[in-house]
């Protein structure tokens, strides 16, 4: 794979991973619309690890708290703020792992990788995001995250297994429906992405162990570095803009892209 292709993949993954526009949908579309060869699972894992590093760095204070809390949680204690956060993240992650394994075993995950599916998901879930953002109250903050809300957001996160839905988009939608502010809904969504990306990358990693040769290490390094930079930039920009701008620009983009994809799929 050429350096240009690697940079393009990393840029798309990095920019779209945390924006509510579906990174997986864009990566599936890349070979379909450009004629480029499919990047393969090794590159997918590398791109996910790059974006994972970006969100960990950006939310390092929360991550450090959750890691310390995980150690407490492993000893059966939920007596600190960090332990409670770790428990919430665990509860929010379990549903998507279970449903993801079911889709992978049954082969349904591959069956949904079509342009029409992505197009419809872009439009439908974009409209749902708009409705939730405009109608949702702003009565809760991330510090008041509850186990019940974590489970509800986790259930919503399973919809992200449909290509084009957007993991960040659907969890932000759930957060806004539950009454979290725009920035706090995004913050919870990003924190939820950490264990989800780790689980996804681990699952993909099991499939590609032993297939990456020495020549692939260069490609992996390029993709990880570029996706990290792109994701950190996109995440920083979005979190700043959310202080004064709604999610409407992302909704407009989703609907416009969805219409184009449906036109391509049905003509």
Image (cartoon, rainbow, N blue to C red):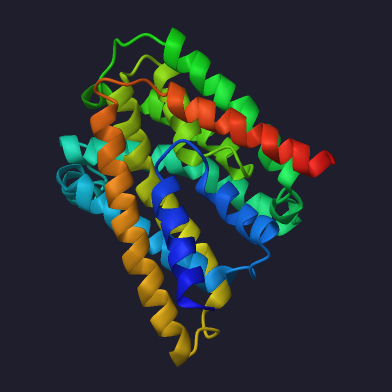
Relative vertical location of residue 65 with respect to residue 208 in this rendering, above or below: above
Please indicate, yes or no, whether residue 231 appears anywhere in the rendered image: yes
Give whichever of 178, 238 is nearer the camera: 238
Image quarter where the C terminus lies is top right
Q: Residue furthest right?
A: 267
Q: Quadrant of residue 245?
A: top left
- Residue at 51% x, 73% y is 42
- Residue at 47% x, 66% y is 45
Q: Quadrant of residue 261?
A: top right
Q: Position of residue 207 (x, y in %)?
A: 58, 73
Give whichever of 190, 24 is nearer the camera: 24
- Residue at 48% x, 44% y is 94
Relative vertical location of residue 143 with respect to residue 225 in this rendering, above or below: above
Q: Position of residue 208 (x, y in %)?
A: 55, 76
- Residue at 63% x, 67% y is 36
Q: Position of residue 88 (x, y in %)?
A: 34, 36
Total count of labels: 0
Image quarter where the N terminus lies is bottom right
Please indicate, yes or no, whether residue 152 appears anywhere in the rendered image: no
142 sits to left or right of 119: left
Q: Quadrant of residue 186?
A: top left
Q: Residue furthest bottom?
A: 214
Q: Position of residue 231 (x, y in %)?
A: 34, 51
102 sits to left or right of 168: right
């Amino acid at each position: 794979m050429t350096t240009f292709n690697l940079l393009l993949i990393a840029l798309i993954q990095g920019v779209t991973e945390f924006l509510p526009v579906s990174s997986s949908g864009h990566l599936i579309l890349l070979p379909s619309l450009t004629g480029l060869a499919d990047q393969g699972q090794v590159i997918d894992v590398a791109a996910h690890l790059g974006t994972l590093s970006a969100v960990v760095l950006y939310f390092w204070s929360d991550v450090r708290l959750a890691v310390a809390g995980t150690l407490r949680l492993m000893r059966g204690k939920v007596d600190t703020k960090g332990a409670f956060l770790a428990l919430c993240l665990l509860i929010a992650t379990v549903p998507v792992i279970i449903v993801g394994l079911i889709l992978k075993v049954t082969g349904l995950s591959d069956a949904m990788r079509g342009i029409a599916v992505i197009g419809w998901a872009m439009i439908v879930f974009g409209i749902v995001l708009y409705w939730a953002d405009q109608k949702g109250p702003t009565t809760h903050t991330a510090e008041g995250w509850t186990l019940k809300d974590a489970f509800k957001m986790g259930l919503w996160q399973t919809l992200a297994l449909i290509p084009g839905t957007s993991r960040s988009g659907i969890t932000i939608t759930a957060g806004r429906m539950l009454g979290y502010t725009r920035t706090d809904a995004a913050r919870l969504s990003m924190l939820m992405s950490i264990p989800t990306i780790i689980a996804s990358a681990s699952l993909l990693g099991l499939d590609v162990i032993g297939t990456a040769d020495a020549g692939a290490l260069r490609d992996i390094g390029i993709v990880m570095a570029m996706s990290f930079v792109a994701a950190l930039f996109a995440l920083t920009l979005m979190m700043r803009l959310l202080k004064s701008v709604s999610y409407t620009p992302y909704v407009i983009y989703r609907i416009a892209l969805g219409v184009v994809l449906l036109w391509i799929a049905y003509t």
